[in-house]
Image (tube, rainbow, N blue to C red):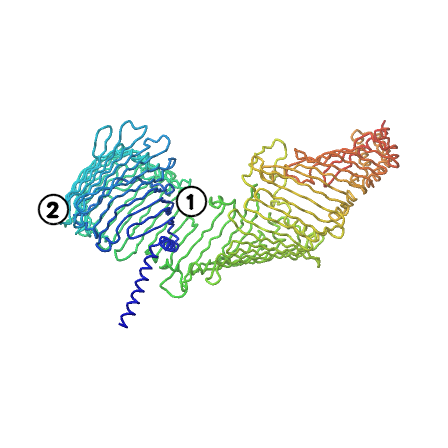
Amino acid sequence: MKLVRPLLVTFGILLALLVLSAGVALLPSVQQWAVRRTLAQHPELKLAFASLSLGPTSARLSGVRFERDGLVVTAERAEAEFSAWQFLLRRHVRIDRLLATGIAIDAAKLPAARTPQAAGAPVAAPGALARVQLPYTVQIGEVQIAGRATLPAGPGRAPLVADFQLTGGGIAPGQEGALLLRASLLDATPGAVVNAVRVDGRLAVRETVDRAFDRASLVLTLNAEGPQLSHAQQLKLAAGMESAGGREQLTLALDTQQNGQSATLLKISATLPTNAPEGAGTWELHATTAQIEPFFLGRALPKFDASGAGKFSFNAQTRAAMLQGQLAGNLAALEALEPSLRAIGAVRVQSEFDIAVDRATAHLNRLQLKVDGEQPVLAVETTQPLVLTLGQRALQLAAAGTGPLARISVTQLPLAWIRPFVAAADVSGGTIRGEWLLQGQGDTIELRSTAPLKIDALTVVQGGRRVLDRAELSLQSRATLTPASLLASVESLALRTPAGDVVSGEAQVELPGAKTEEIIVRGKFTADAPRLLEPVLPLGHVQLKGDIDATLTPELVELRGFHGELADAKGRPLLGAASVQASTFDLQAMRLKTAASGETAVARLTIGAMDFAALPLVQAIAPLRGTLQATTFNLTVNDGRVFLKPAAPLRFQDVTLLGETRQPTLDRITIETSPTLEYASFGDWRLASGETKISNRDQTIWFGATAEVKATPADGVRASATFNADLAAMAAQPPFVAAQVLASGRASGEIRGALAGKTVQIEGRTTLNNLVLREGNQPLPVANFNFRAARTPDKRLTFEAPILLDRLGQRSDLTITADAVRRADGFLFDAKIAGEHLELADALALLGLAGAPVQAAGGDSATRKRAPTNGTAAVRPVEPDARPFWTGLRGELTLDVKSITRGKDWAMTGLSGFVVIDPQRVAVQQLQGIINEKSRLGARIDLRFNGGATPYHLSGNFSLTDFDAGAFIKAFDPGKPPTLEGIVTVAGGFTGDGANLDHVIDRTRGQFQLTSRQGVFRGLKRTSEKVSVATKAVDAVAALGSLFGSDKVKGAAEKVAGQSYQVDQLAQSLAEIPFDQLVVRVNRDDALNLRVDEFTLLSPEVRLLGKGTITHVANKPLLEQPLAVNYTLAARGKTEQLLGKMRVLDGTKDDLGYSKMKDVGTIGGTLSRPDPSQLFIKLAQSKLADFLN
């Protein structure tokens, strides 16, 4: 008792725990927690629910939502009443009630099926009803399921909406139960021929007491409705299986009813012995498009009518089946399936067949097939039975014997029928013709041409280019199949085009047998191609020939021999390649191997002498002149590494590159290089240029370089290059003509780069040294340019470029830095230009080496092509930019240069600026600096993009206060006194719009005003002090005297010269005018002329008032555009006395008491060379006139 009692207590505790666990498991909250936890472990299952309750007699689920691949299924409520005890204790599945309401199936986002799916019937196995044995007794009481489904539709059509309801039940042993389906499928597409299909269906089964079925039937009726249907349309599927008298009878019928008349489309009838795994039956087909098209809800179908009949049999135990019969029909409007099939048109097909299959073989006992279009197209007919052994390549005769097995005849197959099935190119032309005979002898089957395959007027267009034009193709072929191999051969191929192209060749492809995957390829060809290769290889008239002998497997390519030649029309070689010995290429390891050890020659590549001017391919890339000398490359292998090396340096002789004006941009240079390639694998290779030299026509070498790109598994890809250039010798080439100012100078440097994974780094340096100008042997600074750029795996970019100039210890430095990150809309950057000191003279001197205009070597400037400057030149419309030229860039740029000097007379400190770039605007928000410690520079610029015909709009303003104009002019032109000397203030603004950036700059308009309170003006200074203006006038009169032979005129001229003292005195007094006030107002008008609206100068003795224009001339710098300023001069004091003696005053005074001159003066010339001499010539001429009078 003492032992039993503890055992009973323990058992009671365990029982209580078990009951408690079961009770907890039945709590809805616990069930929901457990299911949700399981779903959380499978995130690919997008299943959610609001509530869940599961018990031994019922289950309830609400708020269900399921998503997968665009399909969304929801249900408001699902309930089931059942007996779990019946299932556990009696193996009886009893569902008393099954209810699901508020079901919504959204499949509108699923891709619509490209091919319509036909209604299917149940698949019947032999003795199907008898062989279906249920593992449990099934009893289903009441079923109620209702919902709505939204289905995808084709392009331009509304989604289909289907409402469905499934009811019924009563399925139990010994009685018949049924499920009833009622559904409506609605199409809301405007103008749809059929807008609704009503579906009624009934599935009935009778269950036996021994858990089997002895009867099953399915009736499905579809009724089409639509405003454009003139009569009722019905499609009915009836299928039934019934077991009686030891046999099962299978029937299936697909009927239509149109306008009260019934027709059977498909009828299948079969008898299956109950206890035998075999059956046999018959089939009949009579169908047209009109009978079934309404039930596809507007989906277009090809137009067809088909009829046929036959019989079939099957045996499940031996897996054998047989199908016999006849089938014929007409087919048209195939464009309903695919628009490209329109070209096929109407087709008539007739066939008779007898086909059988079993476990290991397929029997083609009879086949007769005819396909006709507008003319007979294809005919296939067997004359003896054929047996194909499945799983092997052996095709054997059904009975011993020899002779023809089948004939295939293609009589008039239009190429238009082939065109829709060739996606890579557009194929057109005439017809395809050919005949083949299939015959056997023992275990050998041969298919050979009895008439060649011919194609007329074959035209092939690929990528918009005509690859083949109206070619005639003829091909004789043969294929032989034995138990050991398959050999397919093109015994002869001939291609001819109207342009005279001729291609011929032969080829063999052999598959040795079923136990190997080898493919042996042999072939050779010749071609004479005046125009055939132009679309892909524009080399003009060329000749080709070649041959190959190789074996291919999925792992290896064994190349026993190959040879290929490309020559010009006269047979002179251009390119050639030939194997030296057999080799094998491992496709998996990507390695080339030979049977020999050590370094072994594998192939030889030859390049013939080429004249670039005679090669259309070269001229299509660039207008190049010169020759490539003949050379040979040797391909060798050593321990799996491949080497490609030239036998001698590659030499390009007298290379000339012509520019747009047909003048040389590179003039008769010679390039020598020795490129080599070393390859072991994709991650282990090396490409090197060798020593590369470029020389002028006088053999002076002006550029040398070496470059290498190398990849290793450890370091990734690395590249390096070094170069050295003689800048003075480079000046002989037009692009570097600016270097002609140099007596000597060299440029040297290197570039290095690395690529490891997604990290990229590149850096380089360039040094310019020993730069000496020809004029005065003046040395230029040594310049060092360096840069470093990198990209990290997270798409961040960094860039740094320090620049250092040094002349005799005077150093200048600038550093450009930028950080950027690549985003979906472009680059977001932060950049800066900074420096401690910049000597402007040094920077301008170096920039001048690259800024001089390019002149063609040996070219005459008078004959050089220039842009037209007269008003009759045709003006091409400017195409507006569709998007800003800075698209893809967004960020900020900061400018910070501490000091800029120009000699000792001019200095700027604190030059700073801030530029902002966003998708629609580039703005210089701040640009400022201090000049010579007093003057302040300030400017703002805003460029916006608004779209339209003139998408860009530019605006801005600037100011310059207390600016020492004389010091500035002296700093930049110390050779002569400055035209203006004094402290000035300049302020102005500008606006512009245009289609692109150049257009905006050309159309910029604006104004500025210059004022000064004290200074010196030298704008009226004569350009030459050696000969007076009066003397020029005397020389002119003397010349007239000589013409008329008058000594009196000569004498008068000499007396005038004696009186010219006053003119020279006036010129000296006006050469430098100390002024108390100067005002200049300038506007740029819509015609792009600079209009001087006001020129006012006031000094103690002189007052100048003027207006004028600087006329815009296209393609001319501003300082070289013509200047014309008219001014009036008034004077007092000594200048007034001089003018009075010369009797050029008009006798009146202005409002300030200055005496006014009679005539108006003019300043001509250009801004860079103003010419005030017209005033002094007028004064001299007036003096001469007074004397003659």
The residue positioned 56% from the left and 51% from the top of the image is: 669
- Disc 2: which residue: 246
- Give residue 86's position: percent from left, percent from top: 23, 53
Mark closest to the chain's N terminus, 1 or 2: 2
Disc 2 residue type? Gly
- Disc 1: which residue: 536
Q: Is residue 27 above or below residue 881?
A: below
* Left or right: residue 540 compared with residue 975: left
- Give residue 914's position: percent from left, percent from top: 64, 48
Q: Furthest-bottom residue in view?
A: 2
Q: Furthest-front residue in view?
A: 1
The quarter of the picture where the N terminus appears is bottom left
**Displayed quadrant of residue 1175:** top right
Q: Is residue 770 above or below residue 207?
A: below
Q: Furthest-left residue in view?
A: 245
Q: Nearer the viewer, residue 726 or 51?
A: 51
Tag count in the figure? 2
**Displayed quadrant of residue 155:** top left
Q: Nearer the viewer, residue 913 or 664?
A: 913
- Residue 42 visible in rendering: yes
Disc 1 residue type? Val
